[in-house]
Amino acid sequence: MLVDLIVEELSGNGVAIIKKPEKAFWDGYSGYVADPDENLWEVGYHPYLPLDKNGEITERKN
């Protein structure tokens, strides 16, 4: 999964992995890393997030 590849690459560049990626309760998949200033960042995938052809988030249509 892309999230795993991103976190693996970040780890190889010395970024602290706070929580390895795993299935999330909201049906997605995510993990957490920390930058050098110890800010937490979530790397995640949401299977139901609507994206346009450029990968930009669009409004959800019900």
Image: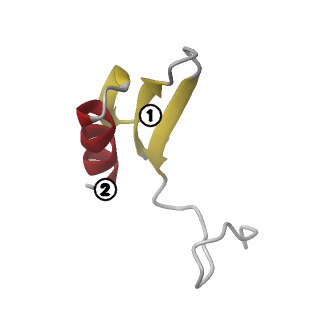
The x, y position of residue 53, in whole percent, is 58, 85
Name the quadrant containing residue 9.
top left
Q: Give the position of the N terminus as an image quadrant.
A: bottom left
Which comes before the other along the chain, label 2 or label 1? 2
When the figure is inspected, residue 23 is found, relative to residue 55, above or below; the finding is above
Relative to 11, 52 lies left or right: right
| Residue at image location 50% in from the left, 19% down from the top | 36
The x, y position of residue 21, in whole percent, is 31, 34
* Residue pointed to by mark 1: 25
Circle 1: is it few (<14), some (14-19), or many (20+) Cα within 10 Å? few
- Mark 2 vs mark 1, CA separation in Å: 19 Å
The x, y position of residue 55, in whole percent, is 57, 73
| Residue at image location 33% in from the left, 37% down from the top | 10
Secondary structure category for the residue under label 1: loop
**Direction top: furthest residue:** 38
Relative to 61, 12 lies left or right: left
Judged by depth in the image, the label closer to the viewer, 2 or 1, is 2
Q: Which mark is residue 2?
A: 2
Q: What is the three-letter code of the residue carrying label 2? A: Leu
| Residue at image location 60% in from the left, 72% down from the top | 51
When the figure is inspected, residue 17 is found, relative to residue 22, above or below; the finding is above
Q: Give the position of the C terminus as an image quadrant.
A: bottom right
Q: Nearer the viewer, residue 46 or 43?
A: 43
Name the quadrant containing residue 31.
top left
